[in-house]
Structures are given as C-alpha cells and as structure tokens.
Image: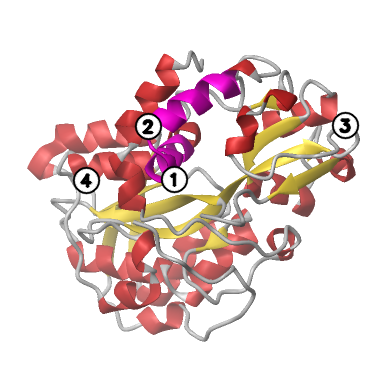
Amino acid sequence: MSIKTPILALALTATGAAAFADSHAGELNLYSSRHYDTDERLYSDFTEATGIKINRIEGKADELIARMQAEGANSPADVFLTVDTVRISRAKEMGLLQPVESDVLEAKIPAYLQDEGNEWFSFSQRARILFYDKNDVENPPATYQDLAKPEYAGMICIRSSSNVYTQNITAALTAHLGEAAMADWAKAVVGNFARDPQGGDTDQLRGIVSGECDIAMSNTYYFARAIRTDVSGLSDSLDQIGWVFPNQDDFGAHMNISGGGVAKNAPNRDNAVKFLEYLASEQAQKYFSAGNDEYPAVPGIGLAPSVAELGLFRPDAIALSDIADNIGAAQRILNEAGWK
C-alpha cells in the first residue's frame, strides 16, 4: 500500500509533556534496544511530568524478545521499544504485544507509520539515503535501482545482509518492484561492491573519506551527527561528501523507524499507554531530532539544525506493515545474491 504524504517541512505545534501531568503515579517497566545516551532526557522528562518511575531493561532487540517470550505471562515488561521494523514486527508475530486504542496516537502518528492492528507505533524516523564522493562521482545515482548500473562497478560500500537496515530497504523495494526485479538488482549491486560488507553506517561514510569507496548507503542521522558534533574520521571531511535522497520522482526515500508497543502481559498497562502517548508529544518529538538527529514521526515538528541542513525531500510513505510482510522475501533475495 502506498500513501502520498507532504514533503517533510519545518514547523512547530504546541503540546508537550505537561499534557500528561494528570497521570496516576506508579511505575513503568521499559524493555528498550535504543542505546542512545540522549534518550535519558526523554525518560527523565516523562517521570518529572507524570510521577511515573521508569525501570529500564536495555539490550539487543533479539535478546529482549527472547526474554519476553521466556518470561511468558509473568513478564514484567510494559513497553517494548526498538529501532527497526524487523524486530518490532517480529515481536508482534510472536504474540508479545497487544493492541492499543488511543485517540492521541491515532491523531498524531500517520497511519502508514503504525501497525495495522495498532500493536506498535513509530516515534522517529531516519532516511536511508545515498552518499558519494563529490571529487570522484560526477553523476551520482538518483535512485536505489541505479546502484545496480554497471557504471558504478567497484564503487559501493554498504552494510551486510544480516543488518536490519539492509533487510528493511530490500523488503521495501521488494514491495514496490517485485521479487523478480529485486533478485536481479541484488545480484548486480553485489557485483558493484567496492569491498565485502563490513562495519556500521559510520564506517560506510568513512569509506568515502578514505577513498575505499565512492558511493555509500547510510541512515541520515549518522551524517547529521557528524555535522552537530565531532565524529572521528568523518566530521573533518564532510565537504568531500555529497548526498542524494533517492527516488524523488516516484515513491520517495526509504525511512527506517524507531517504534514501540505495549507488551502483551503489561502489569502497568495504563502507564504504558501514557508513555507511548508522551513519545508522540511535541516535547519528545522535538528531542528525537535535537538529541539524536532523527526525523520526528509526527508531522509539523521542527527539525534540529543538523537534520534540517540535509534539506527537504519526499519520504517513502509505504505502509510499514507492507515492509514487514516482505522481510522473509528480502532475506531470501539477499542470500541468493551472495550478499555477505
């Protein structure tokens, strides 16, 4: 399913954590795979506004999912928070989440950024776009499909097939283009690798600086972070790197999400819903951008200068449920292409 949305713009609305000050005090058990120190502000502001104490269990998403499954009906988890569609949809498929009926979330979170069964919602986004060496690439790829062109042979640095970002974008492109077209695309992209996939997104960008590759795929917040603060091996060379928001003439730039849902056996369900509603508030949404260089999920929220510097673009408004439905096909396509 594809839904057209406006280009991301800069604006402000007027709601914040104070809107939740009438919450009943208590506690909230948060299972989170978000590993950003800047999220401390989100948690402390929520507690200050509501009196609800947050008990955090942090770890890798797969480990937290396994823990929730093992705990079963006795799980203390109230909210599961993660950074990609793959894991949050997996939690739903395993029966670890429950539907949430919230007028606040329905009004603020666009339909394509929430689960069709209301079991999880997106709260921040990162565009997965193309970066290139301005000194060596005269005609950078304009679309994701262009990465398969022979002219880019030996030029591309990208994440491994086991990485959820690679799986997500392959699933999204599969939903748009079909499995047969994507099988050909993946094989051609593998043929254009400058090196075997290795490292994280920052390493792909550093590959441009070092000259190891000329084109890289990365989430925007890794580059925006290097604008806002010093990132070793990257910040001093940003003038060398250009960027392209792909597919602006058709479906738009792919968006990775960070999202959460209420755990199936949440002992503090009301507080869990309050927390999700807080994450959709103006105060929290602005902090996702200012604190972690992400794009808000709620339309009309102002962007941090580091994020705004990347410019306006058309995001892909594919329903996240459509991406989730194609994860299995994406993994098969990547494996058959020899994408390490």
| Residue 247 part of the magenta segment | no
Marks 2 and 3, the one that precedes in the sequence? 3
Q: Position of residue 319 (x, y in %)?
A: 36, 56
300 versus 56 height, above or below: below
Amino acid type, mark 4: Lys
Q: Where does the magenta region start and end?
A: 168-190
Which callout, 3 or 4, points at the residue further toward the start of the chain? 4
Q: CA distance from mark 1 to mark 4?
A: 15 Å
- The residue that appears at 38% across and 43% down in the rendered structure is 175
Q: Nearer the viewer, mark 1 or mark 2?
A: 2
| Element on which disc 3 rests | loop
The residue lying at 45 percent from left, 59 percent from top is 317
Disc 1: which residue: 83
Earlier in the chain: of badge 4 and badge 2, it is 4
Toward which corner of the image does residue 67 lie, by quadrant?
top left
**Front in this rendered view, residue 67 or 292:** 292
Q: Main secondary structure of the magenta part?
A: helix
Q: Is residue 181 left or right of residue 230?
A: left
Pointer 4: what residue?
Answer: 92
Between circles 2 and 3, the one closer to the viewer is 2
- Which amino acid, mark 1? Val
Estimate how packed mark 2 is, as few (under 14), some (14 to 19) or many (20 or more) residues with alpha carbons within 10 Å: some
Q: Say which element carries label 4.
A: helix
Disc 4 crowd rating (10 Å Cα; few below 14, some 14-19, many 20+) is: some
Up the image or down, 151 lies above or below 83; here it is above
C-alpha span from label 4 to label 2:
24 Å
Helix, strand or loop status at disc 1: loop
